[in-house]
Amino acid sequence: GAVVSQHPSRVICKSGTSVKIECRSLDFQATTMFWYRQFPKKSLMLMATSNEGSKATYEQGVEKDKFLINHASLTLSTLTVTSAHPEDSSFYICSARRDRVAEAFFGQGTRLTVV
Amino acid sequence: QKEVEQDPGPLSVPEGAIVSLNCTYSNSAFQYFMWYRQYSRKGPELLMYTYSSGNKEDGRFTAQVDKSSKYISLFIRDSQPSDSATYLCAMSSSNTGKLIFGQGTTLQVKP
């Protein structure tokens, strides 16, 4: 399968600071990337869909000013958690698809802890 | 009613057993169906990808899609302790491209 690399795998930050998470498709061009949040023993909650070169589409209830998503190239999308608070602590995962009908490949996930 | 329903389990089987995992869905627009395996604290790994109805086999894994019943299955033959993980079904339609996930089923294969 195709490879999606997510970095960092783990980050601890202080409350009030911002954290950037990168998602790269290493061996294919991803026209669409997705960002998910996962709570312990729960399924993946879609936060937003990003298409290369256009603004991200956020799911209902997700604050777009808090979770900034940029999809500047066909191989890179970033999620920035701004002014992080302890309730933002979670497991964040990205996925990438070549197009709307292709299979989706996931990154390794980033465990964010806000202290 | 959720768009995709999946029994969270846990499901415990002895090594060598045939495992059957299932999902039901309500949106008839779904055409693309995927099964993922997720180990603790890791990203989901794609196991199977199928389009529309039918069967697909890959090694010990077989995926089945019955669009008329809105029901999909994943079978694991000769299950191994290393198969112990959470299995997530996911599906999408061509108009949005968004993946909709089931809750995931936790599987434990005992040696």
Image: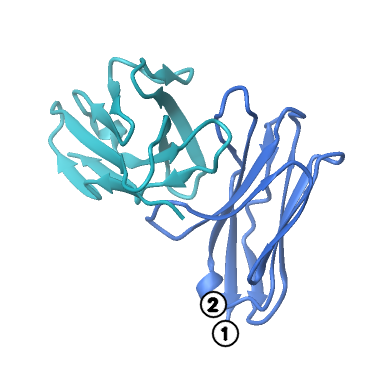
Chain colours: A cyan, B blue
**Is residue B108 depicted above or below B38 in this figure?**
below
Kind of element beneath mark 1: loop
Q: CA distance from mark 2 to mark 1?
A: 6 Å
Q: Marks 2 and 1: CB-CB under 8 Å?
A: yes
x then y, percent, for residue A86: 25, 34
- Name the side, left or right, on which A105 lies relative to A89: right
Q: Are labels 2 and 1 assigned to the same chain? A: yes
Query: Is disc 2 surrounded by few (<14), some (14 to 19) or many (20+) residues within 10 Å?
Result: some
Q: Amino acid at mark 1?
A: Pro
Q: Amino acid at mark 2?
A: Pro
Q: Which residue is mark 1?
A: B111
- Name the side, left or right, on which A105 lies relative to B4: left
Residue in the image at 33% along x and 31% along y? A74
Q: Which residue is mark 2?
A: B81
Residue in the image at 46% along x and 52% along y? B44
- Name the side, left or right, on which B38 lies relative to B105: left
Of A113 and B48, which appears nearest the observer?
B48
Instruction: State which quarter of the image contains the C terminus of chain A.
Output: top left
Q: Residue furthest bottom?
A: B111
**The image quarter in which residue A34 lies:** top left
Q: Chain of mark 1?
A: B
**Is residue B99 depicted above or below A43 in this figure?**
above
- Name the side, left or right, on which B35 lies relative to A20: right
**Is residue B51 depicted above or below A69 in this figure?**
below
N-term-proximal mark, 2 vs 1: 2
Query: Is disc 1 surrounded by few (<14), some (14 to 19) or many (20+) residues within 10 Å?
Result: few
Kind of element beneath mark 2: helix
**The image quarter in which residue B13 lies:** bottom right
x then y, percent, for residue A42: 50, 45
Q: Chain of mark 2?
A: B
